[in-house]
Image (cartoon, rainbow, N blue to C red):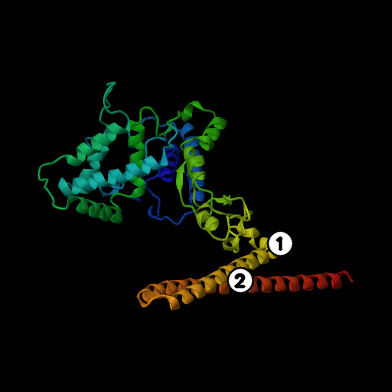
Amino acid sequence: CYQRMAREAAAAAEPTVSTNTDPAGGSGRDDSDSTVDPADKADSLAENARETAVEATVSTNASDPAGSCGGDDSDSTVGPADEGGCDSEPASAPALCEFADVETLELLSARLLNTMATRVVQGGLQPSDAMAEVRGLLSEKLSSAKKGPRGLAVLHARLEKLEARRSFGGRFVSNAADKVAGKARELEVRGEYRHGGRQRLALELVQRYDTTREWHCGCDMEQLGSTERERHLTSCVFRPVGCSHAGCTALFSARYEAAHDGSCEFKVVRCALGCKESLPRRDMEAHVAGPCAMRPAECPFRALGCLAPGLVQGEVASHLEEARDAHLQLAMARLLQQDQELSELRQAMTEMRAAAETTAATSASAAASTIAGLQKKIAALEAGQAAAQAAAKKSAAQAKDTTAALATRLAKLERERG
């Protein structure tokens, strides 16, 4: 849209106005192309708008101060070449800064397409007539009342009223929402409502209804010198800016650049836990939950009683090496404890067996049940003892491997020194 605006302004500032035979405004390309890098696109938009302001200061044609789209369209007939929006050559270059909030223009452009598709489906209108109705909003008067809707709220209220209007020959349609959406896609594919044209029309409507300039700049460029114009076009808070982070395709107004930078998922940031890694923000959650060296961790011997405080994943290996002897002592203490428990249980079982032999036959079943329970406990303890022994052997093997590795490294260092 900004590129078309710049071309129109440049053409209007020339002494001789050339004839444009391209219904799309002479762009010579499909506006639906989305393969352009957002940062390059934003630079191109800003540069074109800068050219627009420069050309505007040398324009001598003032027959249409509002531009080709700012006049009264109530008596005009919109032909197929104009259905893409404001694509005809303007009578004069714009004198105001034409930067506007990018998101607002995009949302309003989509709303305009929906409104015009609604009028075609439910109002029984031809596409050109639907476009003429929407363009008629440019010439409607704005209320000066202090109460009630103001600014773009007035525009959206009028669009809602337009969508609800029933013209002669209009019809009620079942599944209207689906059919309107389908018609909108059909019209956009056919090129009758080009995205660039709708963006231009959306800009004109924002300039018309946003009287407080909350969503567009509207700065009088003719009151600025050439240096001030250049400074304004590179610092205007409404100028389009593309995200500079690799992989991000977001395009937004400059006033949202800091907010986007603070939440962009493609921005490379330092690890939230403080490790030395830098990675895209969208990968941070998986990083801190997985390979991050600063992720809180527990010692593998915690079950045996090792309660090393403040241990992180990157320190586990060094902790195992430094606390090897302490871990062996914990394992041995656990083995001795289990041996003692087994001895006590065996003694209790022996006593109960002796008691069972001297007990009357009536108590035999109760004693057998108790013995069975004790046997289960013994089996569990023996299994725990086996696990502790295995852990002790594993720790000893690790210690042996570590000692061998250290010896190998020491020998290698001695050879290198020699």
Q: Quadrant of residue 131?
A: top left
Label 1 neighbourhood size at 10 Å, few (<14), some (14-19), many (20+)?
Answer: few
Q: Residue at x 64, y 65 (%)?
A: 333
* Residue toward you, 164 or 306: 306
Q: Quadrant of residue 373?
A: bottom left
* Residue toward you, 212 or 230: 212
On screen, 300 above or below 246? below
| Image mark for residue 79 | none
Label 2 sits on residue:
391
Work out whether residue 169 can be spotted.
yes
* Residue toward you, 268 or 236: 268
| Figure label count | 2
Label 1 sits on residue:
322
Judge from the rendering whether residue 285 lies leftward or rightward of residue 166; answer left or right. Answer: right
Label 2 neighbourhood size at 10 Å, few (<14), some (14-19), many (20+)?
Answer: some
Look at label 2 and name its amino acid: Ala
Lower position in the chain sequence, tag 1 or tag 2? 1
How far from the left and from the top, in percent, is residue 93?
A: 42, 35
How far from the left and from the top, in percent, is residue 57?
A: 48, 32
Element carrying mark 2 = helix
Judge from the rendering whether residue 351 lies leftward or rightward of residue 143; answer left or right. Answer: right
Look at label 1 and name its amino acid: Glu
How far from the left and from the top, in percent, is residue 8?
A: 41, 41
Q: Residue at x 59, y 60 (%)?
A: 302
Q: Quadrant of residue 146?
A: top left
Judge from the rendering whether residue 398 lies leftward or rightward of residue 300; answer left or right. Answer: right
Work out whether residue 64 can be spotted.
no
How far from the left and from the top, in percent, is residue 294?
A: 61, 54
Q: Residue furthest left?
A: 169
Q: CA distance from mark 1 to mark 2?
A: 17 Å
Element carrying mark 1 = helix
Judge from the rendering whether residue 168 lies leftward or rightward of residue 34; answer left or right. Answer: left
